[in-house]
Amino acid sequence: MSKYAEIESLALEIICTENSTHNKMQMLCDLLDQKLNHFNWTGFYRADNESRLLHLEVYTGEPTDHTTIPFGKGICGQAADIEQTFVIDDVSAESNYISCNINVKSEIVVPIIRDGIVLGQIDIDSNTAAAFKQEDQDLLENICKALAPYII
Ligand code: SME
């Protein structure tokens, strides 16, 4: 089994356990952080569609000041607004970007969508430029798809 297939299968096991969604999200952050060296900050935000705000739910990595992000603001806010995955190879080239840590060079944000509504997202920062490849995107999109039914 390839490394990414193994991580996906461990992630799907976590998602199918009897834990709360909050705990599943934390376990997923810990798993990804442990298995993938280029994941330097891994977190889940939940979306409030009435206020159009993202709220940080869980993370693995350094604490961040950006625990609430409006839709449209930063990479996270744009991914929530447009409901699409964002892969940013060089964060310094982005005008609509919120910096959490000066060491971050690249970022990926994958929205969690159910019935056309964004419920949240997974956000990963890397201290390596252009760290996120197609296999990362596929893994994270499959995790978000599997997690979507469990988000209330
Ligand atoms: N960089 C993000 C903000 C969240 S931190 O990476 C944890 C953004 O531009 O939306």
Image (cartoon, rainbow, N blue to C red):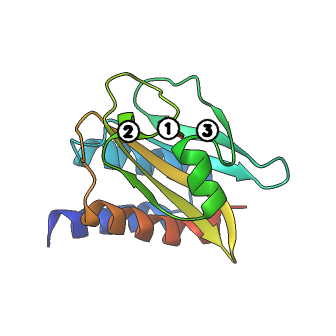
Q: Residue at x 56, y 41 (%)?
A: 74
Q: What's the residue type where badge 1 is placed?
A: Ser
Marked residue nearer the N-terminal end (1 or 3): 3
| Place of residue 133 in the rendered image (x, y in percent of width and height, measured from the top left) | 25, 59
User: Toward the viewer: 76 or 36?
Assistant: 76
Q: What's the residue type where badge 2 is placed?
A: Ala
Residue with the mark numbered 3: 56
Q: What's the residue type where badge 3 is placed?
A: Leu
| Place of residue 92 in the rendered image (x, y in percent of width and height, measured from the top left) | 37, 33
Q: Disc 2 vs disc 3: which is toward the camera?
A: 2
Q: Residue at x 67, y 40 (%)?
A: 55
Can you tell which quarter of the image residue 86 is in? bottom left
Report, in whole angstroms, how far the alpha carbon at label 1 lies from the one at label 3. 22 Å
| Place of residue 12 in the rendered image (x, y in percent of width and height, measured from the top left) | 41, 68
Q: Quadrant of the N terminus?
A: bottom left
- Residues at badges 2 and 1 in contact (C-beta under 8 Å)? no
Residue with the mark numbered 1: 95
Is residue 20 among what the camera can see?
no
Q: Disc 1 vs disc 3: which is toward the camera?
A: 1
Q: Secondary structure at mark 1?
A: loop
Q: Residue at x 69, y 48 (%)?
A: 71
Q: Is disc 3's CB within 8 Å of ligand 1?
A: yes
| Place of residue 100 in the rendered image (x, y in percent of width and height, measured from the top left) | 47, 27
Give the class, few, some or many, for how many residues have Cα within 10 Å of label 1's Cα (few <14, many ≥20): few
Give the class, few, some or many, for how many residues have Cα within 10 Å of label 2's Cα (few <14, many ≥20): few
Q: Residue at x 61, y 38 (%)?
A: 56
- Residues at badges 2 and 3 in contact (C-beta under 8 Å)? no
Report, in whole angstroms, how far the alpha carbon at label 2 lies from the one at label 3. 25 Å
Report, in whole angstroms, how far the alpha carbon at label 2 lies from the one at label 1. 7 Å
Q: Secondary structure at mark 3?
A: strand
Residue with the mark numbered 2: 93
